[in-house]
Each structure stands twice: as C-alpha cells, then as structure tokens.
Image (tube, rainbow, N blue to C red):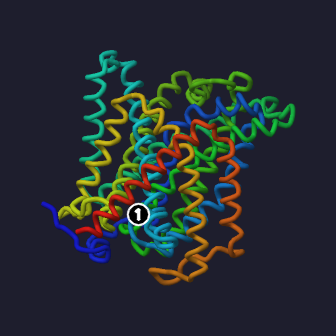
Amino acid sequence: MFEPVSNARASESALIRAMGFWALAASIVNVTIGGSIFALPGTLASSMGAAAPLAFVIGAFLFVPITLCFAAAASRATVTGGPYSYVAAAFGPFPGFATAAFLWISSVAGNASLAAISANQAAHVFPSLALPVPRSMFLLAMYALLAALNARGIKLSAAAILIFAAAKVLPLLLLVCAGSWFVHWDSLKVAGVPTWNSIGNSLVIVVFAYSGIETALAPSGEVRNPARIVPKAALAGVATVIALYVGLQWIAQGVLGAALIGNNAPLAAVADRIAPGGGRLLVLVAAVSLFGCMQGDLLGSSRLLYALARDGFLPARIASLTKTKRVPLLAIIGHSLAAWAAASAGGFTTLALVSGGAFCFVYIASCAAAWQLQRRNAAQAQKPLSLPGGPTLPLLGIAGLCGILLTLEREEWFAIGCALVGITILFACNRWYRHGT
C-alpha cells in the first residue's frame, strides 16, 4: 500500500505534479474564505461604524507585501512544506522546525474551530448532536469523509478545491452585485474618523481573515512549474479575496445601515432584504464554505507533516506515499485525528491563544526568508520571482506584523512562550535521537 522514500529529492520526485494555476489560486481562496466573513461585517461595524470597509482596504495594504514575500519565497524553494521549507532553506533547521510547529498548531486549532462551528449548526437541526458522544461521532464522520476525499489523490483534491471555491465565491459575488441595488447611500457616510484603538483592533481581525495562503502553498511539490505558477496564483487568489471582502463589507453596511452593528449573521440578513428566504441559502453557502475550508486545510497541513517526516523530524513512515495515488495517507490521517480530538474536546483555549500570535510569527519568518533567499540568489528552479526594492517589501510586512504583535495580551505571550519552550525541547530531543542512532 505504501512506498517509502529515502531522501527529500526522491520524495519530491515521487509526488504527482497535478495542480495548475486555477487549482492553486482556488485553493488560496478556498482556505482563506472560511466562516468568519459571514459574521465579520457586523463585528467590524461595531468598532469602526460606516468606516468598516476601510479596515479591509488598510489590511490589504499590509497583506499584499506579505503575499509578494510568500510568492517570491515559494518561487525559490519549490519543494513541499510551504513556510517551513522557505524558512529552513533560508535560516536552517531550527527556525524552520519552529515555523512548522507554530503553523501546525495554528492549523489544528483553526480546523477544529471550523468543525466545532459545523457541529453547532447541525445541532440546531438535530438536537442530539449537542450531546458529547453524538457530537464526537458526527465530527469523526466529517473528518473521515475529508480524509477519504484527500486520499483519492491530488487530482481529485484539486478538482474538489475548484468546486468548493466556486460554490462559495459565486453566491457571494451574486450577493454583492444584487445587493448594490438595495444600498442606502446615507448608510455609507462616515460620521467621524475612527480612533487608533478601533482601527488597531479591527486590523488584527482583518489580517487573520486574510490568512490562508501559508497553508494553501504547502503542497508546492505537487504544483506544475511552481516557480512560474505559484507567484501568479498567489496574487490572483489574494486579489480575489480582497475584492470580495471589501465588496461584502460595503454591501452589508449600505443595505443594513445601523442594523449591521453587532449582527451575528449580517450576510444572511442582507440576502433576506434582497429576497425573502435568501438568508437560508446563505446559511447553506456558509456550511459549504466551512467544509471547503477544512478540506483545503487538510490538504495543506498534511503536506506540512509530510515535509517534516521527509526531513527527519517525524517518523519516516509518515512521508511514505501510497503506491497508486502518491499521497501521504498517514499524514492525512494524523492531521485529521489531531483536529478531530481538538474539536471533540470543545475547549482549546491555549491553542487559540497560541494561534493568534503564531500566525504573525510564521508570516514574519516567511517575509525574512523571502529576502534572505533573494539576497543569496538561492533558487531550485529557473527564473524565480524577485522582490522589487530589495528588502523594502519584507520590511514593510514585518513592521506591520510586529505592530499587530504589540496588541497581544500577557496571557497570549505566555502561551506562545510555553509553546516555544516545548518546540525547543522537541527539536533538541529529535536532534539527540538522530545523532545517537
């Protein structure tokens, strides 16, 4: 069933490069647009009022340099692993391992939270799912379905990504277009300039709403001609997300006005204003969006585990590929079980605390790696993307991310510090074991 690999070069050559431009761009959209956008407009309106659409615009100015850094790094380190591979190639094993650990912890927490939301929604229809055992079995069935889908190979996974991305983007795009006829222009007038505190708090939320590219780029070893396709797909995917987010916030503000503030289901409310009963369709779109995001995360995060096993940080068998579909099935199962356990537990406060700051550390490390790889003229393929302005874009991205880190509370820093200590101990134990055998 499995075919082991002996080294990174052999491992990468055994993968099937079946993802093209559209599949990778759709993967970025699929992983980024989860469930938050269906509630986020009301949250932003509470802190910024009618100026809330500006939060997505300002966040885009921060995230575009980060996206360019990811695209540049991915065009130079074209193996599977995403940020882990970029940072390891630029700075060595320990920074790469720490980046991978933070990214995986965040992915498990994020995937589990989406699964928990899905279970909570299902419990409204089937009340028995609110009980611990039925809820856990429902979650297990969901992850079993996702694992089975990913086990069928990268070609089917790529096709599923295109379907999920279309199923969430097209209804939301239709909502923006149809909603523009119901906009009350007075609702879009900004009464006053938001405070710096409200802008800062909103940007933290917006930047994490934009996150997803770090997971979507992990299967680079299964992308055709990654040095050419990855930069174009990254920019196209992120541009689509930015345009859609700004449009949805603008439409929600213009249609609902003051009723948007604190609204837990603003997009469903907009759909009901446009067509009675339209909110129910948006709930269905939200469910598809959640499931699609989980599928995309499983594809990317399982490849992160695969890359760690390929490089000796996890048991080598996790990097083994199935003989027919050429997928790391054990890595897929491992990530599914970890997310299922976290979602079943219901309370993963520490993981959530680590997750927020961990994404910033992953992005900072990736921005720095992009410049380091370019400065060394490192490349695993011809004609990698070069960042204009030298270190300017990486420094802009790092400065913005450091500003976000300053907003973290003491408890969050403590949780991140504990995670870093644990990561260091794991790295040291792995190094000792590898050198001792």
The residue positioned farthest toward the left in the image shown: 1
Judge left or right: residue 1 versus residue 122. left
Residue at 67% of width from left, 53% of height from top? 402
The residue lying toward the viewer, choosing from 250 and 238, is 238
Say whether residue 164 is left or right of residue 267: left
Q: Position of residue 432 (x, y in %)?
A: 32, 64
Horizontal side, residue 155 vs residue 82: left or right: left
Residue that sits furthest to the top in the current view: 127
Q: In the rendered image of this protein, does residue 93 appear above or below residue 248?
A: below
Looking at the picture, does residue 297 appear above or below residue 408? below
**Circle 1 SS class:** loop
Name the residue rendered at 57%, 82% in the picture: 376
Residue 321 in percent (x, y) is at 22, 63
The residue drawn where x is 43% and y is 45% is: 293
Of residues 408 and 217, the one nearer the viewer is 408
Q: What residue is disc 1 on? A: 81
Q: Residue 263, can we see it?
A: yes
Question: Would you place residue 90 above or below residue 117 in this image?
Answer: below
Residue drawn 53% across the image and 82% down it: 383
Amino acid type of disc 1? Gly
